[in-house]
Amino acid sequence: MLLVYWTEAEHAAASDGQKAESFAAYTAYAEVLRQSGALVTSAGLQPSSTATVVRAPDSRPALWDGPYVESKEQLGGYFVIDVPDLDAAIAWAVRCPGAQRYAVEVRPLMVY
């Protein structure tokens, strides 16, 4: 899984043109992944302020409005890819538009 981080405040302050350019870059990246056969699924996430954190000690739910942690960068979306190894995943992460400015975390999914 490629976890794409960004700064929500910078995105909110971006012009419509800058937002359109960013969207186009991610759309093109997803299309290249799809054409290669590596893309399993992907999605962007709503801002961290829309998150609800759930903890259920003793099976009693306790809810908090998000985000879970205060941080400079927030998780903005993800790509689940099917590649043979970590090197291939890193190669795709390098090509991700998010890696040019922020961070892309590469993390294997657990297989059950």
Image: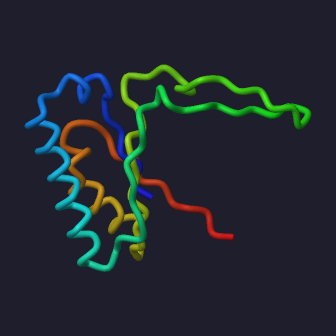
In-front residue for pair 63/26: 63
**Number of numbered discs overlaid on the protein picture:** 0
41 sits left or right of 54 in the view: left
For image coordinates 16% across by 28% down, the residue present is 14
Residue 30 at x, y = what percent?
26, 63
Q: Residue furthest front?
A: 16
Residue 19 at x, y = what percent?
17, 38
Residue 61 at x, y = what percent?
80, 32
In-front residue for pair 13/112: 13
For image coordinates 33% across by 68% down, the residue present is 88
**Which quadrant: the C terminus?**
bottom right
State whether residue 63 is above or below residue 33.
above
In-front residue for pair 17/89: 17
9 sits left or right of 105 in the view: left
Residue 46 at x, y = what percent?
42, 39
Give the image quarter of residue 36: bottom left
For image coordinates 22% across by 53% down, the residue present is 26
State whether residue 58 is above or below residue 21.
above
Give the image quarter of residue 111: bottom right
